[in-house]
Amino acid sequence: MLADLLREPGVEELFELRSEVGFLALHGGNQDRVTDQIAAAAAARAGASLYAIVQPPTLSWHIPSYRHDPALSEALSHFLDHARVVISVHGYGCDGWWMDWRPAGFEETRLGRFHARQAFLLGGRDRDRAAALGDRLRRALPSYPVLDDLTQFPKGAWGMHERNPVNLASGGGVQVECPPRARGLGAGCGNGDTALLVDVLAEVAGAWA
């Protein structure tokens, strides 16, 4: 599945080896919009490594993270061999829902409630680092709920699968699910919160290097 995606016209892999802390954005470009830009900016500022898949505007193909097999991407394999700690940047929600259509009953679902609250969800198996990142996000972006208690998440423990690349680094990893507003998406959203998010991620990556 990953190999098929990487062969699609216009799909790019971004790959930079710097420090032993690395940023992932597996669903960048037109899938989890702006996540590749956030990961790349934080990595550059922190001197951290980067691996991102960027889909073109003509494609929106969601491959579950645990299906990103490093055996199918030389760049991802090298990234995971090099990175000791990983921060994987994801997005959830649909910015279009702010302006027009939402599925019937969406607001009553657990994901709908998180979308309405614009919460950060911190997954991944390194729960100590998730808690530390959560504390820093709460201080920098106090208008956003930050959830690092897996029991509060929508159905399924996000970023917890053993084959998810965020969990393949030797020193652990954190999956950051970013709501639309924090990515500058939706009616009336600017990019000030996105810049603060990049600041936090770069600061944390520098501390963990």
Image (cartoon, rainbow, N blue to C red):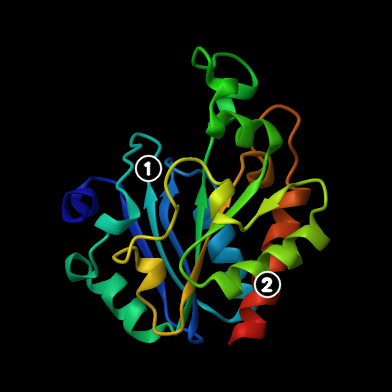
CA separation in Å, label 1 and label 2? 34 Å
Q: Position of residue 81 (x, y in %)?
A: 32, 84
- In the image, which disc is placed on residue 56? 1
Is 44 placed above or below 94 here? below
Q: Quadrant of the C terminus?
A: bottom right
Is residue 153 shown left or right of residue 118?
left
Is 190 placed above or below 198 here? above
Residue at point 59% right, 74% down? 129
Q: In the depicted view, which residue is nearer to us: 25 or 171?
A: 171
The quarter holding residue 195 reads bottom right
Residue at point 73% right, 61% down? 137
SS assignment at label 2: helix
Task: Specify the amino acid type for callout 1.
Answer: Pro
SS assignment at label 1: loop
- In the image, which disc is placed on residue 132? 2
The quarter holding residue 188 reads top right
Q: Position of residue 64 (x, y in %)?
A: 32, 49
10 Å crowding of disc 2: few (<14), some (14-19), many (20+): few
Residue at point 78% right, 50% down? 192
